[in-house]
Amino acid sequence: MKPEPDIHQLFDLTGKTALITGASGYLGGAMSRALAEAGASVIVGSRDADRAGETAAYLPGNDSQNHFGVALNNQDEASLETGYAEAVERSGGIDILVNNGHAADAHDWTNVSAEDFKDQLANATGYFLLARHHRNHLVETGKKGSVLMIGSMYGVVGSYPDAYEGVAPASPVHYHTLKGGIVHLTRHLAVYWAKDGVRVNCLSPGPFPSEKAPQEMVERLKHKSPMGRMGLPSELKGPMLLLVSEAGSYLTGQNLLVDGGWTAW
């Protein structure tokens, strides 16, 4: 009988390599640190190669880990292809992809243009193309691995207009459309790629406003949450590790909401 792995082995990413986009952001920083703290070598993808390298340089690790950055634009097909190829060449192989990069747009439903809307949805195209590069790499090398899409609670439920009225633009309609699409993209790819040994899951945070968010809006959001508070970036670390590690080896096609109970109402 095969020995049962203990809990430390299940969450351990030692010897694994993870590529994460948007790692220099508010939530991306916590997730990239979690990957490194769990033992993975972390490749930081960013539109700015220098920024990617700087972010990678500050990640925790030891001599067995190889953190570095690559230029990777989520909305440029050629950049996705060359960036992923460079990441594979420099690392020797990638096990985990975290699709977190996101080119945001703050227009709301009253003033968003057709071009703004299409540009926002292009993020989903980037998620798919990068995930497909990763799936093909895993199949070609005979490895098993995982893809983690970053969604949002706003890909599952609508927002409350009164939480934003008078203090901030309405939660962007094209953002909601994008995140809802990413949740279903996860399900679709999961069932097609399961036979390839590639797990695909989605992590949907919310609400996690940064310190730059209007405080009046934050206070209103707190009243909408069963837990009565906002999330901290570190509270994404454990759920993310569950989905990308062997601890989640029988999980695929799932959307894990880390939202303080917001969607339980």
Image: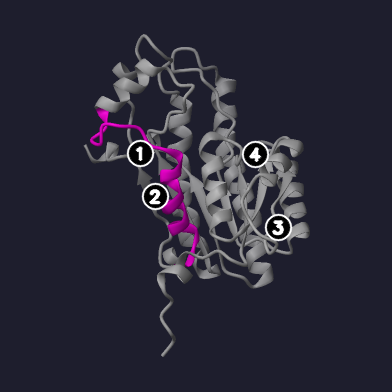
Residue 9 x, y percent position in the rendering:
48, 71
Classify mark 3: residues with Cα within 10 Å, few (<14), some (14-19) or many (20+).
some
* Residues marked 1 and 2 touching at CB (< 8 Å): yes
> Whole-Å distance between the Cαs marked 3 and 2?
30 Å
Q: What stretch is highlighted in magenta?
A: 224-246
Q: Residue at x 61, y 64 (%)?
A: 16
- The residue at the far top in this view is 166
At label 3, which amino acid type do we have? Answer: Asn
Residue 223 sits in quarter:
top left
Classify mark 1: residues with Cα within 10 Å, few (<14), some (14-19) or many (20+).
some
Which mark identifies residue 14?
A: none
Mark 1 vs 4, N-terminal side? 4
At label 4, which amino acid type do we have? Answer: Asn
Which mark identifies residue 66?
A: 3
The answer to whether residue 245 is left or right of residue 215 is: right
Residue 213 x, y percent position in the rendering:
45, 21
Above or below, 128 against 211 in this view is: below
Q: Name the residue under label 4.
A: 74
Mark 4 vs 2, N-terminal side? 4
218 vs 197, nearest the viewer: 218
The answer to whether residue 30 is left or right of residue 55 is: left
Which mark identifies residue 156?
A: 1
Q: Does the magenta stretch include residue 244?
A: yes
In the picture, which quadrant includes the N terminus?
bottom left
Element type where label 2 sits in the image: strand
Q: Does the magenta stretch include residue 236?
A: yes
Mark 1 vs 2, N-terminal side? 1
> Whole-Å distance between the Cαs marked 1 and 2?
10 Å
Mark 3 vs 2, N-terminal side? 3
